[in-house]
Amino acid sequence: MEKPEVYRLLSQEYIVVLDGDTSHNSSKTRNFMDNVGIKYQILPSRFCDLNAIEHVFSYLKFRLLSKVRSKNVTELN
């Protein structure tokens, strides 16, 4: 049986960067990636500055929440 295209792409051209989440660091996850040949790098815990997506989330949260902020107590109701 041939592997799906995503396995080929991830194993040859990319390195998957994982944050310190326990599901990413589980032996089951690492064993799966090792078995299918996916290259990966696990970031140290609490190093969100190294994780680019955290910067995107921060920006989006700032931009989106700044538009819905209440100006006074009456608007909260």
Image (cartoon, rainbow, N blue to C red):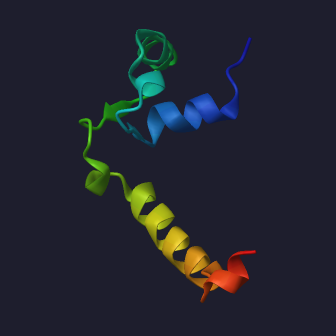
Residue placed most toward the observer, 73 or 69: 73
Image height check: is 46 above or below 20?
Answer: below
| 49 sits left or right of 53 in the view | left
Residue, x 42% and y 16% (percent of image)?
26
Q: Is residue 33 above or below residue 63?
A: above
Question: Foreground: 45 or 6?
Answer: 45
Please state the horizontal and vertical placement of residue 71, each as a whole percent of the image.
60, 89
Q: Which of the image's four quarters has the N terminus?
A: top right
Quadrant assignment for the C terminus: bottom right
Q: Position of residue 19 (x, y in %)?
A: 37, 38
Q: What residue appears at the point 67 percent right and 34 percent down from the top-left corner?
A: 5
Relative image position of residue 45 (x, y in whole percent):
26, 36
Q: Nearer the viewer, residue 40 or 21?
A: 21
Tell me which residue sits at (48%, 10%) in the image. 28
Looking at the image, residue 25 lies above or below residue 9: above
- Indicate the quadrant where residue 14 lies: top left
Q: Residue at x 71, y 83 (%)?
A: 75
